[in-house]
């Protein structure tokens, strides 16, 4: 296994919100201690329900926001509080593809301008002809036609736009690509096209992907490793096969049991979670999953479980026993 | 919307933005009429020395207060008659169009530049600067606009230039508010973040990425401000605080001749009509612009 290109240690991102008149300010713990690493050519998928801190994680890794606490090392260099400001090499290392292909392209720029902008800003030594040549090549690489170069985004469909967004992200030849739910806004048939394109590009350019999604069937298709986030904290992390076959954390098991299976004869025991995701402003004591957990012990309400294990790690005092997981 | 990708046989060129704009602008008949009237006035203003039969300031002492040609006592020598000191009214009105457009262009340029600049800064600034700018604009807006302009001209001294500066300052808060609102709406979109990830510096993001996407409401406001500028300058001129006689500015002409409102109606009526028609045409055009440029109001 090659060296990791990105390592995150205990990454936290907190936001302060005004409490209003005569109330103290509250702290939203959007991301609360995530550790993981990315390896070239591999995909780490991050799953979790809405509000679990997935997008915050994406913004921190892309250096759009700086972490409140924790260490982020990219390509052997530790990221300071300024992020990538003023550092073109670092900027070029990590690029992002957004969820909504309708909002992520500038409506006043042609596709060509959109693709050439990163080069214009970060590679001043590249001549104008060379810029255009590279942009046109990239357009072909993501499966669009050369005549699309001078068109505006409103003339494209969602899938085509997402291809443009991928092309833009790849213009600087990054090592890491953060994919923030890249296919969840697309039709099912287009989803697989874009996913195949992404997997193809990963193989060709040896990219490390941080793939954020709430769609487990997509994750099963593309991921090598899976990280399950709950309220900004990783509750389970492990290789895809192991995690899907033998989930040890009750939350992961519940999440997996909610995936629809296209087999009407197969009876599945669906674990229904009760209650809502607690507010990240006011987390429960102990394990943050305890108010919704059906395997809750006394210790769960007082002591926060540590993430433990080798390769396949989970943070639970009373994990699902291994023989039980096989049935899931 | 044209989906060009679905017709691989013939790579149809999608309609350009200008064409699309014109087709939706054309739907509004009033706006098209307004546009043509506006263009007609523009031509008149541009070719004033060729079109005007006489100099606007030359006094024909043998023909004081001559009525228009279709009335008793009028002649085709002075088509729209003369004023109290024997100047040809038609020539004065034609030259007056120059002043009105000059005023409109300068005032709108000043107000838009300053207002958009402040608005973009307020939209991107930290809270304290944003609050400072916006409260200042609120103070300007809280005065009746003409009164504020009047006070400023009184301080600066009455002249056409000072009137234009005063009106620009009065009009500019509208641009600040409009721009700030548009910037705030655009700023949170993903393409702005993408530009930041691509390495765009704050100034580039403010003026190259975000501003072009906020232009539609600003253009509409600029068009409507044009008519306000013409109207306000005329009002200042009428109050003696704008252009000074013998400048053939429409508002000033009105003021000079209001004592003849009963005895020689034409001296008052024609400058007034000119102001009315110009302002109406510009407002109609501005409404059409809004319909064509603002996708939220677009019918289709």
Image: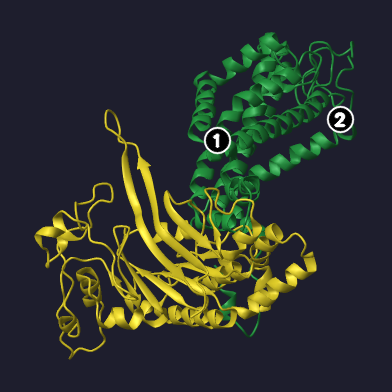
Q: Determine the image quadrant of residue A318.
A: bottom left
- Residue drawn where x is 55% and y is 58% of the image: B194
The shade of chain A is yellow
- Residue drawn where x is 59% and y is 49% of the image: B210
Instruction: Residue B205 in the image: state x and y as whole percent.
Output: 61, 49
- The residue where tag 1 is placed is B122
Instruction: Residue A189 in the image: state x and y as whole percent.
Output: 43, 82
Secondary-structure class at tag 1: helix
Q: Is residue A143 visible?
A: no
Q: Is residue B260 above or below residue B129?
A: above
Q: Is residue A41 above or below residue B179?
A: below
Q: Is residue A241 visible?
A: yes
The shade of chain B is green
- The residue where tag 2 is placed is B52
Both on one chain, marks 1 and 2?
yes
Q: Earlier in the sequence, mark 1 or mark 2?
A: 2
Q: CA distance from mark 1 to mark 2?
A: 47 Å
Instruction: Residue A178 in the image: state x and y as whole percent.
Output: 49, 67
Does residue B108 appear left or right of residue A207 in this picture? right
Task: Give the mark toward the camera: 1 or 2.
Answer: 1
Q: Is residue A169 above or below residue B162?
A: below
Marks 2 and 1: in contact by CB < 8 Å?
A: no
Q: Chain of mark 1?
A: B
Q: Residue furthest left?
A: A298
Q: Chain of mark 2?
A: B
């Amino acid at each position: 296994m090659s060296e990791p290109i990105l390592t995150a240690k205990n990454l936290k991102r907190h936001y302060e919100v005004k409490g209003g008149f005569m109330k103290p300010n509250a702290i939203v713990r959007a991301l609360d201690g995530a550790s993981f690493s990315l390896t070239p050519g591999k995909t780490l998928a991050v799953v979790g329900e809405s509000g679990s801190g997935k997008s915050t994680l994406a913004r921190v890794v892309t250096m759009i926001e700086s972490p409140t606490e924790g260490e982020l090392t990219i390509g052997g260099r530790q990221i300071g509080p300024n992020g990538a400001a003023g550092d073109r090499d670092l900027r070029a290392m990590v690029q992002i593809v957004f969820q909504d292909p309708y909002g992520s392209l500038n409506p006043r720029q042609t596709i060509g301008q959109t693709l050439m902008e990163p080069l214009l800003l970060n590679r001043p030594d590249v001549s104008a002809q060379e810029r255009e040549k590279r942009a046109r090549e990239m357009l072909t690489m993501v499966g669009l036609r050369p005549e699309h170069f001078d068109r505006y985004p409103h003339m494209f469909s969602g899938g085509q736009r997402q291809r443009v967004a991928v092309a833009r992200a790849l213009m600087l030849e990054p090592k890491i690509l953060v994919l923030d739910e890249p296919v969840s806004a697309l039709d099912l048939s287009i989803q697989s096209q874009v996913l195949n394109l992404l997997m193809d590009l990963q193989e060709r350019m040896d990219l490390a992907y941080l793939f954020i999604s709430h769609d487990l069937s997509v994750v099963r298709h593309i991921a090598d490793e899976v990280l399950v986030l709950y309220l900004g904290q990783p509750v389970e992390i492990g290789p895809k096969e192991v995690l899907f076959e033998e989930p040890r954390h009750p939350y992961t098991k519940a999440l997996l049991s909610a995936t629809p299976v296209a087999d009407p004869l197969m009876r599945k025991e669906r674990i229904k979670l009760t209650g809502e995701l607690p507010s990240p402003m006011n987390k429960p004591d102990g394990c943050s999953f305890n108010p919704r957990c059906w395997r809750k012990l006394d210790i769960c309400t007082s002591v926060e479980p540590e993430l433990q294990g080798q390769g396949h790690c989970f943070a639970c005092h009373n994990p699902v026993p291994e023989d039980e997981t096989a049935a899931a | 919307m044209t989906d060009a990708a679905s017709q691989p046989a013939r790579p149809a060129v999608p309609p350009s933005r200008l064409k699309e704009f014109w087709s939706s602008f054309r739907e509004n008949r009033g706006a098209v009429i307004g546009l043509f009237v506006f263009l007609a006035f523009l031509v008149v203003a541009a070719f004033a020395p060729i079109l005007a039969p006489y100099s606007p300031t030359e006094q024909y002492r043998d023909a004081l207060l001559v009525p228009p040609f279709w009335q008793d006592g009028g002649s085709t020598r002075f088509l729209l008659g003369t004023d109290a000191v024997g100047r040809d009214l038609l020539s004065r009105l034609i030259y007056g169009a120059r002043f009105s457009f000059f005023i409109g262009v300068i005032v709108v340029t000043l107000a838009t530049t300053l207002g958009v600049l402040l608005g973009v800064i307020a939209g991107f600034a930290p809270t304290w600067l944003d609050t400072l700018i916006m409260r200042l604009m609120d103070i300007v807006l809280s005065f009746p606009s003409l009164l504020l302009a009047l006070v400023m001209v009184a301080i600066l001294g009455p002249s056409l230039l000072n009137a234009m500066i005063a009106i620009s300052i009065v009009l500019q808060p509208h641009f600040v508010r409009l721009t700030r609102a548009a910037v705030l709406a655009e700023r949170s979109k993903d393409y702005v973040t993408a530009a930041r990830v691509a390495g765009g510096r704050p100034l580039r993001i403010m003026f190259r990425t975000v501003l072009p996407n906020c232009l539609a409401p600003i253009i509409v406001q600029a068009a409507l401000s044009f008519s306000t500028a013409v109207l306000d300058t005329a009002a200042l001129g009428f109050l003696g605080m704008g252009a000074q006689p013998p400048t053939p500015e429409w508002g000033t002409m009105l003021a000079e001749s209001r004592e003849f409102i009963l005895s020689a109606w034409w001296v008052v009526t024609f400058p007034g009509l000119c102001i009315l028609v110009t302002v109406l045409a510009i407002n109609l055009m501005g409404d059409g612009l809004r319909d064509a440029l603002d996708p939220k109001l677009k019918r289709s």
